[in-house]
Image (cartoon, rainbow, N blue to C red):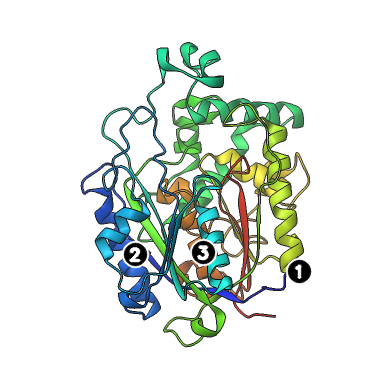
Amino acid sequence: MWENRCKIAVSGVGYSKVTRSAELPLAAHALTAVKEAVADSGLRMSDIDGLATYPELPATGHAEVDGISVVSVNCMMAMLKLPNLTWHIQVGTTNIGGAVQQAVNALLAGVCKYAVVWRAMHNPRGTYQNLPGANAQGAAQFTAPYGFGGPGQGMAVAYTRWLERNGQSREKMATLAVTQRKHTQHNPHAYFYGTELTREDYFASRMVAYPFCLFDCDIPVQGAVAIVLTTADRARDLKPKPAYLAGYGQRLHFEVAGRIGSLSSYMEGGSSSAKLTWERSGFSPKDVDVAQIYDGFSASVIYGLESYGFCKEGDALDFIQDGRIELDGELPLNTFGGSLGTGRIHGLWHIIEGALQASGRAGSRQVKDANVSFVGASAPIVTGTTFIFVGEPY
């Protein structure tokens, strides 16, 4: 078991407004989210002495402009002008979950006292995913000229393989999409708050990349979310009830070629990250009261449920049926609506919800008696990270 179990806590969360396209500069969204997270903690901005993010622009074929399409640590430092800043970092791998883990490590090392982590996502006007065409490099040179270049297309191949290998039907995925949209109606910060989804809507929607239909894909948005992390002893003196970090893990299995990865890459990557999290936290899947599993595409939830150990390989589509993932089910799943309901803010919103559920602060979507909260914060590919939060350290 990890010697630093429950020594770090999430003490505050913040959100900007989520919009479909760039109505405001991305820096304004990030600044709003950071200020809300600090205020939620009951802290002053001058208390913040650590900053971390993962600033990568998710869309291809668009310019990376700090403050407009990305929000770097340098941009945030310029906006906040923190008088007591002692540590900062932005990661280029492991996605936003890696930035959270780096902040945890900095707090444990004593190089800062209160760290803010944010993720700001840009949705450029026009084509979101421009194919590189004649300028394709690396593995993309063999796929992009034929129209195969977006992440949905690559992930659809792995999902097709999963369905065929396990004799399953894509129609069963409607349960996930409809249930998560139902949960979205308890999250006023979500893009699809106030917009319901029926099974009929799911089946009638257009195909994006078979077997993914429109509602299997998260919606690109402009927005930001943020959290404040600090040591457990400091968190106990702050305004909200904290959520304690019991353990975390990173993906340790890698494939050299390809960004999206094969089905085996998903499964082995997810299991390698979860193995560390279970060992460090002292928990197992059967101890989990509520789970948030990254859902940039619906199939990522299926891979997560299996590779993290919640069900056997090939059983995930059957596992999510019969109310099991509802708020009052056996394993409430993506209780904030997931990325399918909130919009694409990568995995920091999953981390936020995991912390809120553990601390009992999730409002009308709060799972009764939830204490052990699992988070799979990004797809179990190269960027996979996992976390366990608890409401009461033990």
Give the residue displayed 46% in from the left and 45% down from the top: 340
Residue occupied by mark 3: 103
Give the residue displayed 30% in from the left and 70% down from the top: 82
Residue 276 drawn at (x, y percent): 73, 57
**Along the viewing direction, whichever of 243 and 119 lies nearer the viewer:** 119
Tell me the mark number nearer the camera, choosing from 3 and 1: 3
Q: Image check: 258 left or right of 70? A: right
Badge 1 vs badge 2, beta-carbon distance below 8 Å: no
Q: CA distance from mark 3 to mark 1?
A: 22 Å
Counting other residues with Cα less than 10 Å from the Cα at mark 2, is it few (<14), some (14-19), or many (20 or more)?
many
Q: Quadrant of the C terminus?
A: bottom right
Residue occupied by mark 1: 282
Q: Secondary structure at mark 2?
A: helix
Q: Amino acid at mark 2?
A: Val
Q: Amino acid at mark 3?
A: Ala
Q: Quadrant of the N terminus?
A: bottom right
Q: CA distance from mark 1 to mark 2?
A: 32 Å
Q: Would you identify the image quadrant in which residue 172 lies?
A: top right
Q: How many marks?
A: 3
**Along the viewing direction, whichever of 165 and 383 lies nearer the viewer:** 383
**Along the viewing direction, whichever of 123 and 303 lies nearer the viewer:** 123
Residue 219 drawn at (x, y percent): 40, 41
Above/below status of 19 relative to 39: above
Residue occupied by mark 2: 34
Above/below status of 213 relative to 328: above
Q: Secondary structure at mark 1?
A: loop
Q: Earlier in the sequence, mark 1 or mark 2?
A: 2
Q: Amino acid at mark 1?
A: Gly
Give the residue displayed 27% in from the left and 66% down from the top: 81
Q: Secondary structure at mark 3?
A: helix
Q: Image check: 43 left or right of 97? A: left
Q: Earlier in the sequence, mark 3 or mark 2?
A: 2
